[in-house]
Amino acid sequence: HNGGTNPHSRRYIGLDQIWEDLQKGISQVYARQSMERKRYMELYTHVYNYCTSVDQSASARQGPNPTKAMTGAQFVGFELYKKLKQNLQMYLAEKLKAGENLLDEDVLLFYTNQWEDYRFSSRVLNGVFGYLNRHWVKRECDEGRKEIYEIYSLALVIWRENLFKPLNKQVTSAVLNLIEKERNGETINTSLISGVLRSYVALGLNENDANRTQSLSVYKEAFESHFLADTERYFTSESQQFLAANPVTEYMKKAEARLQEEERRVQLYLHESTHDQLARKCEHVLIEQHLEQFHAEFQTLLNDDKNEDLGRMFKLVSKIKDGLGELKTLIEAHIHTQGDVAIKQCADTALNDPKLYVQTILDVHKKYDALVQTSFDSDSGFVAALDKACGRFINKNAVTVTAKSSSKSPELLARYCDTLLKSAKVSEDAELEATLKEVLTVFRYIEDKDVFQTFYSKMLARRLVQHTSASDDAEAQMISRLKQTCGFEYTSKLQRMFQDVDVSKNLNERFRSHIASSTPLDLDFSIQVLSSGSWPFQQSVTFSLPVELERSYQRFTNFYSQAHNGRKLSWLYQMSKGEIVTNCFKNKYTFQASTFQMAILLQYNSATSYTVQQLAENTQLKMEILVQVLIHLLKCKILQCKDEADVNNFKPHNEIEVFLGYRSKKLRVNINKPVKTEQKQEQEVTHKHIEEDRKMLIQAAIVRIMKMRKQQKHQQLLSEVLAQLSSRFKPRVPIIKKCIDTLIEKEYLERLEGEKDVYQYLA
């Protein structure tokens, strides 16, 4: 064209002048012929020249509506756009003829090959029409014209209308057939599927967005909805047939494999957006629809300890929303039953064998704790089920029923600890760590922690006083663990006992120095002074010290009252012991004896025989205690009864003498044995104390709550009391009610007038 600087002087170029060559170029592009840069630039220039050569006076092209008149530039752009559109439509109509009767893989090969060529060519075409895109198309789109697209998008829209729409049913059907073949185990050409689906994704344009962003509408409607329906149909049929012919355990392996295959399918050729819906669909059909069979099988697997299968079932069922509820219920019931049965089988022995009792509990816990960790992935719901089941069978079982005591478990656990802490084995560090951990495992489930505390403190006191602890370190560690679990208050008395023992060591040294500096005693004497509030010992019993022991008793009492003016000592003879040497048998023996045994044996330094009545008067012991001490000395064959009396039924006139034929393999003999009646009495007192302590704790909790709340309804008060005290023990509701009545009598609370169940705090 002749180029002046004034655009109006340009020669007008009509569409017919460039179209013929442009059309040839377009055909060249779509035939995928190689094109030199020079030829590409020629085509680009045709579009540029045509668009920029505007005949402003072309009133003939003003259109029927003068107010909406197109400018020359608009009109020129539209003409070229329309021409291109018609050209592509005709091109695809021709292509369609070659593909419309094809099926299966043939139609897929045809569709994917044509698509790849068309897509590539359309990118090139988009470049050729770059000037039209940047100016005319952009302006039209900015003004909101919906049927105008950038040239590449236009090419896609034309493909969608002219090739996709007529062919998509047979194409989609062929894709679904291929997928089914693959599900049936055949090898397929997956690139055919991915090619089709990439095309479906590319064809989704968001018509309402000026930038024509991608939408998945075509992929979802033409493929995904059919694919998901197909999936449901296929797996419904397969799972029903498979389950009818195979056990559930085999079915679970099949389901697991199928889920993995479908996961891979998404990665290989489906769009990622299908992942979640496909997973849900498969889980629904393969798992959720068969949950009842899973539940029935779960119990069998538990009974047979099939841990691997249990793990597989857990993994499958956990994919279903709220699917695990029934399994948790079943495992809780199962563990509870197993615990119950295990204890029932050994109940008669375990009642008096703390080690057997605790080991039986631990065996059940260990087994199912391991199961929860490995097969159920330590899922919090299954951990809770294990805890609930253990809590139930540990606090109520055949042993607690036989003992008619809900507090039997904490008592037996405390006795087990006593045996442990006396055993030399606990002094080995690794062993100790593991054993204490086990004890604490059972302790966590104990409801009546106050009962454990009471028995534990009694037994600790004995170990300390009788020096039977195997290891101070083990004792300290146990207390430290109890403190971690229950807090400082729970162990404060236990810690004070240790302090008393340390203070007593120091006191003994001072007393020895004191004795050494004046008149020495004629016997070895050591003492433990315990503060009465911290030690769970009963008050001393009536008893008259033998004269041989009187002097050391007197010397220490004087020494102590000088050092601590105003403090009163109560002597616990029943807890004291000593050593006594014999000079009346063939061999010389040393007896380790209780103070009561010593008192009786020392009588025989003055005479060879005494009646039971005389021994009672000389020692001042109650008859029931004396008789028990005598029975034991007779059983040891140190004493004998002159008249053939019934050993278990002494009369006051029965005569007791030393049995001179006494023999023992050991020269040091421990004859010290606790008095039965004392033990029995002590147990009764212990339980009585626990009940009293509980009432005090309940009353204190009620007062605390009411002080804070001022007014409270009966039911809410009960709930709060239970919540506050449940870490120590489980208060029974009737007892709480009694405590409320006591506090009303003591005028801490009153019932609110006119209100049936409301209490008011009285300051």
Image: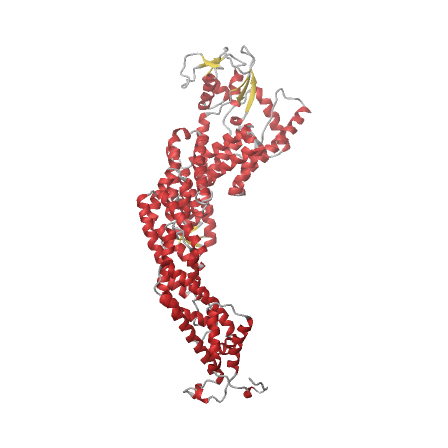
Residue 500 image position (x, y, % from top left): 58, 34
Residue 519 image position (x, y, % from top left): 66, 22
- Examine the rendering and report whether any part of residue 67 can be seen: yes
The relative height of residue 195 versus residue 447 in the rendered view (above or below) is below
Count of numbered circles in the view: 0
For image coordinates 37% across by 53% down, the residue present is 181
- Examine the rendering and report whether any part of residue 161 can be seen: no
In the picture as drawn, the residue positioned furthest to the right comes out as 517
Quadrant for the N terminus, please. Answer: bottom right
The relative height of residue 705 versus residue 606 in the rendered view (above or below) is below
The relative height of residue 297 versus residue 173 in the rendered view (above or below) is above
Position of 254 with respect to 540 (left or right) is left
Of residues 724 and 401, the one drawn nearer to the viewer in this rendering: 401
Of residues 548 and 646, the one drawn nearer to the viewer in this rendering: 646
For image coordinates 46% across by 67% down, the residue present is 119
Residue 713 image position (x, y, % from top left): 40, 53
Residue 334 is drawn in which quadrant? top left
Of residues 444 and 630, the one drawn nearer to the viewer in this rendering: 444
Position of 242 with respect to 725 (left or right) is left
For image coordinates 46% across by 51% down, the residue present is 705
For image coordinates 56% across by 28% down, the residue present is 467
How has the structure been colored for display? secondary structure
Residue 69 image position (x, y, % from top left): 45, 86
